[in-house]
Image (cartoon, rainbow, N blue to C red):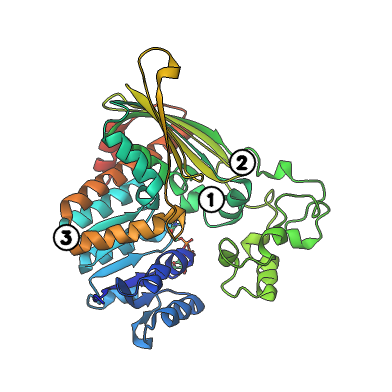
């Protein structure tokens, strides 16, 4: 059995515990957590117990941990978005190779500063974009890179969030307020911006965007609906968003695990009576938009159009790449990729090939496993060039999210070069 690489974990919340911690538990020969920083005592102790971390290696915050000499070669930072900038820069400066959750930071300047810190300190930096490392998107990329559809002309992508998922995360949960966590085009769709940028392997020239919060608003509340579902709502038998229907069932995995660390029925009921997840979806303090579209053009001429919408029944993403000689259509949740290549004559001469991609263990269609594995591979191989290229794409994708939000709120087309120049000046 090979010796696992040692790591510290910062932020033992839902992702720290369930997405990353679980990797080390499944593959103890690859990765071992030897320290944890987390302010919530119950979360800190749960993670520490799951990973056999002794008392003296349990810290109350990333600040406490980073005050100490470097404890291991790797740091996994799974804190909330607003904490990323300072904690990531501190970890890079301390000498850790860093795995950082997306979004890199909740401001565009923060993203650039983190990337600059990785360069300055010569550290590897993996942004947690799991989709890039799923068999599905790897297949799409492989077909494109192999020239199967010729030069890429256009990219169309849709993200159907699902009414219940949107209500959980973007109406009641952590990402409901643009001013606190960032816009949906960043917090949810930086994955999609990353995929588009990765497919195009190019810089964005211009972007426009429209969208608004239409449904999850006070004026749409059913008559007599109280502030909380548990306060005796007159439509509790029919409302699709009735909180106990989601969180007081038999399942205790995500999203129920986000409601209460203690997943007993009593604790969950109490959490709905007092915490954010019991709120009426029409009477929350949310500002996240529930539908948005984006149009962009890359410098090489590839066009990109994208839409995100909350009120879909199912949660799924689609992608369509059109090249000079064919097209690639993909449905992420069905794991199906259709390659069509032009024939000679009418459409019936086209060749069509369907690929059913594998499903790996781990969240995001196996991407959570794939992205950690890629980071560990890069660490073992010291693949600096590969990681820098990957980081450049991630930064470009993040900047596209920020520019799109500026386009949406200003109702203007944003020129990316000017947008980037302004940022460079702002961050000195
Ligand atoms: N890659 C993905 O697909 C994906 C999916 C969901 C969430 N995320 C991202 O993962 C991150 C974490 O999300 P989550 O759902 O686990 O949130 P969470 O709130 O469950 O976890 C964040 C944890 O950080 C802890 N924390 C706060 N201040 C800290 C400090 N000073 N030092 C150490 N820890 C501190 C919190 O107490 C909390 O336990 C976010 O950035 C989120 O946007 C990524």
Please tell me which residue is depicted at 39% across the width and 12% down the height of the picture.
Answer: 345
Residue 296 vertical position relative to residue 52 in the rendered view, above or below: above
Residue that mark 3 sits on: 382
Mark closer to the chain start, 1 or 3? 1
Q: Quadrant of residue 201?
A: top left
Q: Residues within 10 Å of mark 1 (few under 14, many from 20)?
A: many
Viewer-side residue, 223 vs 136: 136
Is residue 414 visible in the rendered structure shown here?
no
| Spot occupied by residue 77 in the image (x, y as percentages of width and height) | 35, 64
Residue that mark 1 sits on: 177
Is residue 289 visible in the rendered structure shown here?
yes
Mark closer to the chain start, 1 or 2? 1
Residue 155 vertical position relative to residue 246 in the rendered view, above or below: above
Residue that mark 2 sits on: 312
- Number of callouts: 3
Mark closer to the chain start, 2 or 3? 2
Viewer-side residue, 55 vs 351: 351
Please tell me which residue is depicted at 57% across the width and 67% down the height of the picture.
Answer: 257
Quadrant location of the N terminus in the rendered image: bottom left
Residue 172 vertical position relative to residue 23 in the rendered view, above or below: above
Give the alpha-carbon distance from disc 1 to disc 3, as whole Å.
39 Å
Q: Residue furthest bottom?
A: 55
Tag 3, which secondary structure?
loop
Q: Residues within 10 Å of mark 3 (few under 14, many from 20)?
A: some
Give the alpha-carbon distance from disc 2 to disc 3, as whole Å.
43 Å
């Amino acid at each position: 059995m090979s010796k696992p690489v040692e790591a510290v974990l910062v932020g033992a919340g839902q992702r720290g515990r369930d997405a990353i911690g679980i990797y080390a538990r499944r593959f103890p020969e690859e990765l071992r957590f030897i320290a944890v920083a987390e302010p919530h005592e119950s979360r800190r102790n749960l993670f520490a117990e799951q990973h056999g971390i002794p008392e003296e290696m349990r810290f109350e915050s990333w600040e406490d941990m980073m005050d100490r000499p470097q404890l291991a070669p790797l740091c996994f930072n799974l804190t909330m978005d607003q904490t990323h900038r300072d904690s990531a820069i501190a970890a890079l400066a301390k000498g850790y190779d860093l795995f950082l959750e997306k979004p890199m930071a909740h401001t565009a300047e923060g993203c650039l500063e983190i990337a600059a810190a990785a360069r300055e300190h010569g550290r590897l930096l993996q942004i947690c974009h799991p989709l890039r490392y799923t068999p599905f998107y790897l297949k799409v990329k492989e077909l494109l890179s192999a020239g199967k559809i010729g030069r890429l002309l256009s990219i169309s992508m849709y993200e159907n969030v699902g009414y219940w998922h949107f209500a959980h995360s973007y109406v009641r949960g952590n990402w409901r307020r643009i001013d606190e966590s960032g816009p949906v085009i960043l917090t949810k769709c930086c994955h999609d911006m990353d995929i588009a940028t990765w497919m195009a392997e190019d810089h964005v020239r211009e972007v426009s965007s429209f969208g608004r919060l239409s449904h999850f608003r006070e004026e749409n509340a059913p008559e007599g609906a109280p502030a909380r579902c548990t306060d005796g709502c007159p439509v509790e038998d029919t409302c699709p968003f009735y909180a106990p229907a989601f969180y007081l069932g038999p399942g205790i995995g995500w999203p129920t695990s986000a409601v209460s660390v203690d997943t007993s029925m009593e604790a969950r009921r109490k959490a709905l009576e007092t915490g954010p997840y019991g709120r009426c979806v029409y009477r929350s303090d949310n500002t996240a938009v529930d539908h948005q579209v984006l149009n962009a053009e890359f410098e090489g001429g590839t066009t990109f159009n994208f839409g995100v919408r909350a009120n879909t029944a199912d949660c799924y993403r689609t992608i369509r790449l059109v090249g000079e000689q064919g097209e690639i259509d993909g449905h992420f949740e069905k794991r199906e990729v259709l390659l069509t290549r032009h024939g000679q004559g009418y459409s019936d001469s086209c060749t069509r090939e369907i690929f059913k991609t594998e499903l790996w263990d781990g969240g995001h269609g196996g991407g959570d496993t794939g992205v950690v594995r890629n980071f560990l591979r890069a660490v073992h191989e010291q693949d600096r060039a590969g990681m820098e290229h990957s980081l450049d794409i991630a930064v470009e994708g993040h900047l596209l999210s920020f520019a799109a939000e500026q386009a949406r709120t200003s109702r203007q087309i944003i020129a990316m070069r000017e947008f980037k120049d302004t940022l460079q000046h702002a961050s000195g």
